[in-house]
Amino acid sequence: MDCEWNARDDIFERYVRNALEPAEQEAFQEHFFTCAACFDKVRTYHALRAELPAARIDAPAPPVRLAAWRWEVAPAAAILVLAVAVVFWSVRAPFRGTTPAAPAEESREAPGAPSAIAVPPAAVDLSALARFDPPVYIPLSLRGPGGAGEEKFQAAMQRYAGADYAGAISGLRAASTLEPDAPHYVFFLAICELLTGRVDSAAAGLRRTIALGDSPYLEEGHFYLAKACLQQGDIPAARSELQRTIERRGRLEAAARSLLVEVDALSDRRDGPRDR
Amino acid sequence: MTLPWKRGSGGPAGHQPVSEENAEFWASLARRVGQGDADAEAEIARRFELRIRLMASVCLHGSDAAADVTQDTLLALLQALRAGALRQPEKLPAFVVGIARNIINHHFREAARGIEVGGDPPGPGSAHVPADSGIDAERGRLVRGALTRLKRLDRRILLLTLVDGLTPREIAPVVGLSPEVVRTRKSRAIRMLRRDIAERDTNPTAAPHR
């Protein structure tokens, strides 16, 4: 084979993930438009990427070889856990204030204004209620090294900041694979999935965010899960998540109250008034 | 008709320009389209349609819009060739890539404008993993079959590489192997898979051309 590109598997891997540098991508595209061997290989890699997620279902649990490494990494792990805990609690307040943007519904009424709550919009439908503005992400400057997935998370969030939600998914998924219990990885992956129409996966991710317990994303987890439920057409589940958002008495309480009123009004128009 | 495309800035080492022999072929093909040869137009579509769809699918993260981009690109290409707008016909493949790139960029601009004015988020097909493996259904079927003949661990390594974007060093602790073993298993799995596909492919890649 006389093609220098063809031997470089990494080029094909990165190409189908849309992860080549622009100049390299441009050159490679022009090449495989004329090279049958590379075109054939692109076909295979592209199909692999499409078919592999189905193979995830029966993937076995990764073999655990604790005995081989646990004592080597135990001190580092302890330091890491301590560092994460310190960072987590020290940044919690600013994070809550900056990360999630005020959802659109929040602007419709002042918190606790019953008159606004009493008059739901007339022409609102389920898809309108399910719509939301993407939560704004403001990068934090953390001291010390981040976790294993931090680099991928930051790279993905650069795409997120550029409204490339589909493009951010790959990096967020990688970060979540490396650190499955990091709530911000799980949360923003779910948000990106929700923004790109992968509603079932997004709902699962938001439930996982909630299941991770008390984190800066717990309230948002409930609120955006309500949005996901609305996208799925599951009004009872959406109501339940909105109630939980309200119960937390947080920043999204007013938005959740407003949305709940609109959901109830829509539900009444569809099914007739009922006791709640 | 003027098409707003510009030539790429050149590639890294390994980039092979179109050979002289190919250049003559492409120039002839472009000229024939300019002369209204319907067979030449069909040849253009046969050679480039799947390439453009794959390129669009990658750049648009698997969006359903890849099909529209492909059609728009082919349409713009044929119109340009009919109008004699290609000044260097021997560089036809690069011209096609340029048109496709412009149409993809236009799609991004339109999508961004839609979000700014409160439009709907992208549709279900826009997730990063191509939702429509039917873009290349035949290859998809072969790959699906070949995957079932791979070991589970190798499938998982490929999944973590191609879908999750992890490096062998990052995969190693996930699967409990050393990075070197991960790297070896990945290369071997790809080789086996490609051999499997080659043995079963009754219709090899259209437009074998170098």
Image (tube, rainbow, N blue to C red):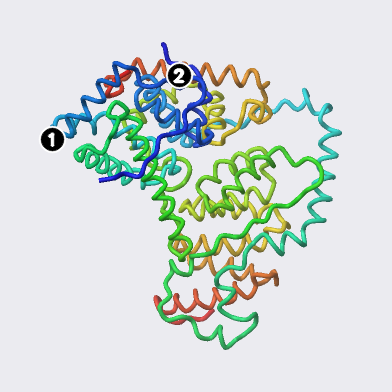
Q: Amino acid at mark 1?
A: Gly
Q: Which residue sits at x=47%, y=79%? A: A265
In this view of the protein, which residue sits in the foreground, B36 or A126?
B36
Residue indicated by mark 1: B36
- Residue B140: x percent and y percent? 36, 31
State how many labels appear: 2
Q: Vertically, is A58 above or below B184?
A: below
Residue indicated by mark 2: A6
Q: Which residue sits at x=56%, y=85%? A: A116
- Residue B208: x percent and y percent? 29, 20
Residue placed furthest toward the front: B87
> What is the secondary structure assignment of the residue under circle 1?
loop
In this view of the protein, which residue sits in the foreground, A64 or A41?
A41
Q: Is residue B208 left or right of residue A180?
A: left
- Label 2 chain ID: A
> What is the secondary structure assignment of the residue under circle 2?
loop
- Marks 1 and 2 sit apart, C-alpha to C-alpha, by 36 Å
